[in-house]
Amino acid sequence: MHKKLIGRRDFMKSSLAGFGGLFFLPPLDMKQEVRVVETKGKEKKLVYRTLGKTGLKLPVINMGVMLTDNPNIIRTALNSGILLLDTAHGYMQGRNEETIGGVIKGRPRDSYYIATKINLPQNRTTGLYREGATIEEFLKRLDVSLKRLGIDYVDILYQHGVSRKESVMYEPILKAFEQAKKDGKIRFSGVSTHSNEPEVIDAVTDSKVHDVILTSYTFKQKHYQEVRKAIARASQTGIGIVGMKAVRGISQQPPTVKNIPASFKWILQDPNVHTVIAGFTAFEHIETDLSIMKDLSLTEPEKLELQKEASLPGLYCQGCRQCLGQCLEKLPIPDLMRAYMYTYDYRSLAHARDLIVSLNLPSRVCEECSSCPVKCSIGFNVLKKIRDVARLKDVPSEFIA
Amino acid sequence: MKTIYLGVGMFIFLMGTALEAKDFAFPEITGWKESGEIQTFIPKNLYEYINGAADLYFSYDFQELKVAEYQNEKKGSVTVDVYRHKTPLHAFGIYSQERLPEATFLDIGIQGYYEQGFLNFLTGPYYVKISTVNTGPEDREVVVAFAKKVAQNLGEKGSFPSILSSFPAEGKKGNSEMFISKNFLGYAFFHSGFTADYELQGKKFKLFVIERVNRDECKAIIEKYLQTIKSPRKDTTEGRYTLSDPHHGEVDLHWKGVYIWGIININDVDLRSKYLKLFEEGLKKKVLSD
């Protein structure tokens, strides 16, 4: 019997057709302000959007500081017109916040904005908080961050790395945010997410608690339409949206994006995204990234390049989670697809087996059903892949490592 | 036996992985039990564990992370993260980025340090981070016991990069040496380099050194730098350069052979000269001892 194989040309065609007209948005009212600023004798065009109900007017590109402890890079970024510095309690074991503290010392407090994030112990498999995730610990970490930064308050405090709606509503953290606001230690609260984003964003919107969401959002996400939809809903309620992973593409090492300016422009074509944070480690990055504000519209060659790049990956599960609930055995399909990816893409059997074993699968996997009701959004033969990779649970670990 | 159903392809995968795998096992600790399975993270999913901090680890050629969790009867928990990097130099790099100079340093692996609730240490190509919850007043005792056992299982500890010995000792802030793997001092053409912080007579400054494979590479770096800061020279020769950098201010550097060393963040010309000389002596000693 001949297998029906899909050729590269067909794959490209079907992927792009799937995007419909939505991969690129039509020109919309951006509600943005353009200002010409002068830095070191040079005129520069900067585009500003308002971060939702916070009212903060920010340039559409700001700085994620996580990659550098070079104070002169941060200083140059601020002197170039960047207003928001994004860091986290855990970056560089705290040295990242200390470095920022050194740079902002002596600058007027209203000349910059600081966003930091606090994480608390989470169960890695479920994404739920575990023992040690207390209001006291959260507030203690906030105090440490403020001390490192040398300031009395942060403009935005995020709950770091949330992947479940239950975690958005985790009471000790909600109480901690409330207390921190009451004490004047934070101006605005938010949630950061780069996994299961639509669920998290929707939960934040429904909670009516937070002011800002920091989310992965890139043309490389196969579920970008769900992310976009969730962002739109959040934005309509006044929540400020900050994009991240703009040029890296989710879960991939740099450099994975060929056209960096086009990647930024792709996110910023969405009027519901108010700013994007970019990680600079070289002075030239600042110039290059800020220069996209000369013209935020995507050129035809840029569009073509993005379309090509967007359709090349996608051979593996994108984590859209649409399959959840379809399986009669309630198997954790996205996790099993990840294990498949670890096996055949990363060639890491140990990693795949670790994951499979942690899932506590039934003894017979996908052997009881005569047909599989699961319809994968990107057309995977889920049954075949699960049967294949589930065999790893029976392989003794000593045979692998 | 179920494994006989494994196909030939899978068998080849298994053998390949077995050859690549590192012989490392998490230790058994009296009074503590491993809870759950050991988790493995690789570059493509490290962000699932450490969020945005993963980006920094990638720039130090992160290879793999193994995580084990332990619990005791008093509901205390210890998490052991073993990060493996491509080389010991890269492991030192990421360790140095997160090292806290004011912490309590310990003789574990090449070096370790403790602060309430965690202990980090460096050994060979591994950067190990151990954190605790609910360990009470015995926190330090517990975490040190774990660290020692883990270090034993990770094999040869190795040593700090030898070039660190060439940094002048006078005024150097303890444990401030770093290895920056990319875009050193904010310039892509500088590639990688080492820095250390200094404080002398109330003046704070930074020394740095770049080591390249050959003289031509150093020459190309100097030429590109002069071009970038708009201070081109007719001939680029070995020797001292006192330059005005738009981002770093006054930079004094010296190029000789495969080394470029320099000093930033200080205006005192005499002090700059003194340190460039001291650094040169240190590098000479290093070359002789290598």
Image (spheres, helix red, strand yellow):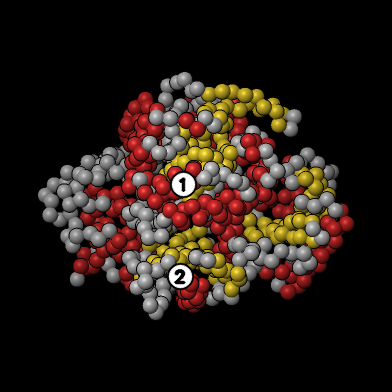
- Mark 1 to mark 2 CA distance (whole Å): 26 Å
Query: What residue sits right under mark 2 in the picture?
Result: B136
Residue name at image x 36 percent, y 68 percent = B75
Q: Are marks 1 and 2 in contact (CB under 8 Å)?
A: no
| Depth check, front residue: A117 or A253 | A117
Query: What residue sits right under mark 1 in the picture?
Result: A179
| Depth check, front residue: B234 or A103 | A103
Please, which chain is the residue tagged with disc 2 on? B
When the figure is inspected, residue B195 is found, relative to residue B140, above or below; the finding is above
Q: Is residue A38 left or right of residue A96?
A: right
| Depth check, front residue: A168 or A29 | A168
Q: Residue furthest front?
A: A182
Observer able to see residue B159:
yes
The picture places residue A127, in percent across and down from the top left corner, at 35, 52
The picture places residue A170, in percent across and down from the top left corner, at 36, 49
* Quarter of the figure with residue A395: bottom left
When the figure is inspected, residue A247 is found, relative to residue A301, above or below; the finding is below
Observer able to see residue A265:
no
